[in-house]
Image (cartoon, rainbow, N blue to C red):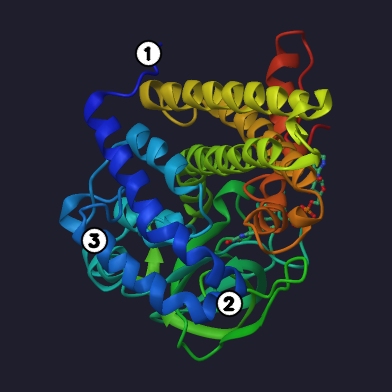
Amino acid sequence: MDFSTPPELQDLLQRAGAFMEAEVYPLEDAARESFEDALEACNEARERCKAAGLWAPQMPPEYGGMGLGFLPHAHMSEILGRSPLGHYVFGCQAPDAGNMEILHKFGTAEQQDRWLRPLAAGQIRSCFSMTEPGRAGSNPTWMDTTAVRDGNEWVINGRKWFTSGGHLADFAIVMAVTSPDTTPHKRASQIIVPTDTPGFRHVRRLSIMGDLGYGWQSHSEIAYEDCRVPVDNLLGQEGFGFMIAQERLGPGRIHHCMRWLGICERAFDMMCARASERLIAPGRPLGSQQVIQHWIAESRAEIDSARLLVYQAAWKIDREGTRAARNEISAIKFHAAGVLQRVIDRAIQVHGGLGMTDDTPLSWFFRHERAARIYDGPDEVHKTVLARTILKKYGIELGSQGS
Ligand SMILES: Cc1cc2nc3c(=O)[nH]c(=O)nc-3n(C[C@H](O)[C@H](O)[C@H](O)COP(=O)(O)OP(=O)(O)OC[C@H]3O[C@@H](n4cnc5c(N)ncnc54)[C@H](O)[C@@H]3O)c2cc1C
């Protein structure tokens, strides 16, 4: 395995890093105060990002993107992850990036023209509505939202929450049960729902540890009430909802992990800088204390080992596909999320009271990235997946819920 970065990619990563310094970090203070008020400046930075040839790294040039492959984009993701605004300014933010990917892979030419083109250009926004308040999201085969065919239309009914970016989005891709009597993994389909469709009701933004967010930077509860869309809005084939969701989630987890490593590096830099600048007595920096040195050393080792594990998973996906790499993907999902949480926590501790304020990005990371251990499969589910495969070799066969 050779995980070295090719020289042409190094150059690109340097350009992306320089753009982050010049255009993205300076927006953070205002965005932390109010993303709504900072939106215009963020959108202006997006235009400069396009002009610099750094827009939509994951999308092919025919959609205005850079056409980076899976691994180069993963490297970019780490650079962009250093700021909560990086992916947004570069046009590859979740959940739009995942929706672009599935529209590109499974959308019809009409769907691509109507939804993918403006989405990739950053002219509209989207969301992905799968999780429901009344059902355990960790078992997504069990959901109550239905889409029933009536003539040339789907009639959708159900309630979703944690639809990220649902506030002021232009369309949703909703997972709904279309064939209730078939096997669990073939029951649901994905359907495109413009948010101005009668029956699409934005119920509320969910407050995340005190932060309501706004627009792209928020999570919504949505009610689908006799919401009718044309049958042509089906994405891919009927009953293929889970297959499409898996296509989206596997590589998506690599990008999340790389984004988290970017956050880790930023928090690590801040921790080291604070440890050397902050004096606990005249001439005695905080970093002279052994306990702080240990946090720094542990963080360095944990970040580097997580990165190697992520590269290894990406390497396997590249060669053998997402399915073959599912154990590696499960391992990085819970491991990198744990490293992320520990590194941010240590950085806050080193900053003392300052770490608790919103004067640095650490509090934002702490509040919003705690969810890394929950979304795209909670830690416990991924650990079960991995342990199940390991135990199989020792003669124990376990079901999908570990039973
Ligand atoms: C910030 C954020 C953004 C999100 N964005 C989206 C989005 O855009 N679209 C969308 O559809 N969803 C989204 N989600 C929802 C997310 O996918 C779900 O929260 C996740 O799948 C877990 O489902 P749940 O919340 O219903 O928890 P539950 O399924 O109720 O699980 C609760 C807890 O039980 C434990 N648990 C669950 N199953 C097992 C098991 N088999 N073994 C042992 N322990 C278990 C875990 O500790 C888990 O955290 C988002 C969530 C968050 C927090």
The residue lying toward the viewer, choosing from 214 and 396, is: 214
Rendered location of residue 383, percent (x, y): 73, 30
Q: Residue at x 75, y 56 (%)?
A: 354
Q: Quadrant of residue 73?
A: top left
Query: Which residue carries the number 2 mark?
Result: 34
Q: Residue at x 37, y 44 (%)?
A: 17
**Amino acid, disc 1:** Asp
Mark 1 vs mark 3, CA separation in Å? 31 Å
Q: Does 201 sit left or right of 100 as displayed?
A: right
Mark 1 vs mark 2, CA separation in Å? 43 Å
Query: Which residue carries the number 1 mark?
Result: 2
Q: Residue at x 41, y 11 (%)?
A: 1
How crowded pointer 1 is (Cα within 10 Å; few <14, some 14-19, many 20+) is rated as: few
Q: Residue at x 37, y 21 (%)?
A: 319
Mark 3 vs mark 2, CA separation in Å? 24 Å
Query: Which residue carries the number 3 mark?
Result: 50
Determine whether 330 is above or below 56 in the image: above
The residue lying toward the viewer, choosing from 305 and 192, is: 305
User: Does dot 3 land on a helix, a strand or a loop?
Assistant: helix
